[in-house]
Amino acid sequence: MLERTVGEIIGKQTLVRLSSQDSVAEGAKAMTARHIGCVLVCDETDVCGIVTERDVLDQVVAAGRDPQTTRLGEIMTAELRSITPDNTAMEALRTMGEVGVRHLPVVAGGGIAGIISVHDLLRSVVEDMVRDREFLLDMWEGIPA
């Protein structure tokens, strides 16, 4: 179940990139509009960090900061741990556990090709379980009583 590669799981993604000077409110609106849990923070063409829903909750909402005036650059995680599309789902899950994150940038060809989340991994496992269940049921029906 966790042998699928990260590349197989994420497929093609359109990444949301915002400026470090954009407000946290703008980042939250972008995440909500696209039903995603994080945005990449960039200056010019370089990715300089990531902001997740957890960052918004912990560093802005719970801390009583104003999301209109707080900038993404103030709350982003700048030191990014990443994986490649060839890594397995198990390796991605292990890395997330080691680092304590729910989103990992997927790096290929010198840039970020996507982001894999715990949600993506869970969906993949469930899909595999459903497929395996159907396979086993088909086999069971073929066994004489």
Image: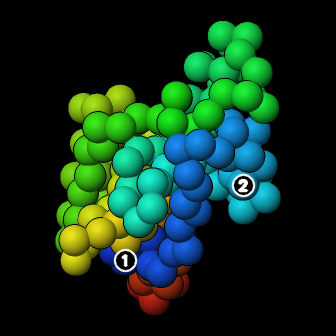
Describe the element under mark 2 as helix, strand or loop.
helix
Q: Is residue 84 left or right of residue 8?
A: left
- Residue 128 image-quadrant placement: bottom left
Q: Amino acid at mark 2?
A: Ala
Mark 2 or mark 1, whichever is nearer to me: 2
The residue carrying pointer 1 sits among few (fewer than 14), some (14 to 19) or many (20 or more) residues within 10 Å by Cα, namely some
**x then y, percent, for residue 98:** 24, 32
Tell me what residue is drawn at x 59 percent, y 19 percent: 59
Evaluate whether residue 46 shows in this view: yes
- Please give the residue where the numbered disc 2 appears in the rendered image: 30
**Disc assigned to residue 98:** none
Evaluate whether residue 131 shows in this view: no
Is 82 drawn above or below residue 67 in the view shown?
below
Is 65 drawn above or below residue 3 in the view shown?
above
Q: Is residue 46 left or right of residue 41?
A: left
Q: Nearer the viewer, residue 77 or 84?
A: 77
Q: Amino acid at mark 1?
A: Glu
Q: Nearer the viewer, residue 77 or 117?
A: 77
Is 46 drawn above or below residue 24 in the view shown?
below
Q: Are marks 2 and 1 in contact (CB under 8 Å)?
A: no
Describe the element under mark 1 as helix, strand or loop.
helix
Identify the colour scheme used: rainbow
- For this orientation, the residue located farthest to the top is 63
**x then y, percent, for residue 16:** 58, 62
Tell me what residue is drawn at x 59 percent, y 43 percent: 21
Q: Is residue 106 left or right of residue 126?
A: left
Tell me what residue is drawn at x 51 percent, y 74 percent: 13
The residue carrying pointer 2 sits among few (fewer than 14), some (14 to 19) or many (20 or more) residues within 10 Å by Cα, namely some
First in sequence: mark 2 vs mark 1: 1
- Please give the residue where the numbered disc 1 appears in the rendered image: 8
Tell me how far mark 2 sits from mark 1, CA to CA: 25 Å
Question: Which quadrant would the N terminus be assigned to in this image?
Answer: bottom left
